[in-house]
Image (cartoon, grey):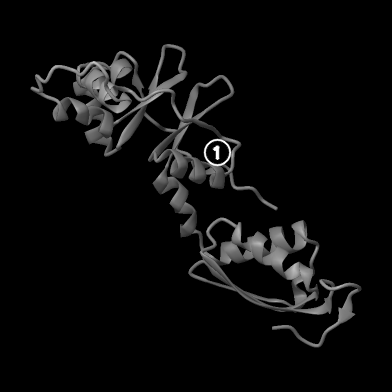
Amino acid sequence: MKRHTVGEIMTTDVLSVHETTGFKEIVETLAELRFSALPVVGDDGRVLGVVSEADLMYKVELAGDRTPPRLLQRKRERTARAKSGADIAKGLMTTPPVVIEAHETVATAARLMDTERIKLLPVVDRGGRLVGVVTRRDVLRQYLRADDEIRREVIDEVLVRALWIDPTDLVITVDRGVVALSGPLDRHSEIAIVVNLVRMVAGVVGVLNHLCYRYDDTHGPARPMEFAA
């Protein structure tokens, strides 16, 4: 079955900022590109961190704040005060960077972005050097796939190549990303496998399962069935 990877959806023509880039230049770059974050790299191209609008906001939030720092500060407060006083990317960025490699799946990227609550994910090579970025918009772009393209992948990659199932007796339609499956499979146990794999196809919004089976192999020896709900 085809694995859709980060390398297929990432943006390779991407700008980054050097660790010595100044605050104002970072703001100007974010505004010009309409990005919410940028990777920060060193002289060797390795990703050192990510600087986001949220990192830059500390300078605005704490501007003119003359309250003496407490002896025992929470980590967030210490971080906020440090970033509010920084004027180059090295002091503004969030570290360590959350990164991913191009061979990882799109699903892995989506889970990582959700878990870490980030909008931009730098893509690196094995040496940690920047080769691209993935955004939430890139991940969601798979849902723009044409219905015909999704249907071909369901038939060719899921049924034929992955499961060796002859699709001749099956009816497979796709409407705005929703895949409808009907017709008989040989065994009852195959239904759940087919449905789960179809859900994993890039661009599939949902699956309508109307499949039936010829033999029930879920309770002892397989026995013929006339239909299944």
Q: Residue 148's image quarter?
A: bottom right
Is residue 102 found left or right of 88 in the rendered image? right
Q: Where is mark 1, residue-wise?
A: 7
Return the residue found at the far front: 72
Q: Position of residue 68 (x, y in %)?
A: 14, 17
Q: Position of residue 185 (x, y in %)?
A: 78, 75
Is residue 22 found left or right of 115 in the rendered image? left
Establish if 99 lies above or below 162: above
Q: Local crowd at mark 1 within 10 Å, few (<14), some, or many (≥20)?
A: some
Return the residue found at the far right: 221
Q: Secondary structure at mark 1?
A: helix
User: What residue lies at 89% left-to-right and 80% top-to-bottom?
Assistant: 223
Is residue 41 found left or right of 111 in the rendered image? left
Q: Quadrant of the C terminus?
A: bottom right
User: What residue lies at 72% left-to-right and 63% top-to-bottom?
Assistant: 193
Q: How many marks?
A: 1
Q: Position of residue 138 (x, y in %)?
A: 44, 46
Establish if 176 lies above or below 53: below
Q: Residue 13's image quarter?
A: top left
Establish if 97 lies above or below 173: above
Q: Residue 80's image quarter?
A: top left
User: What residue lies at 64% left-to-right and 48% top-to-bottom?
Assistant: 3
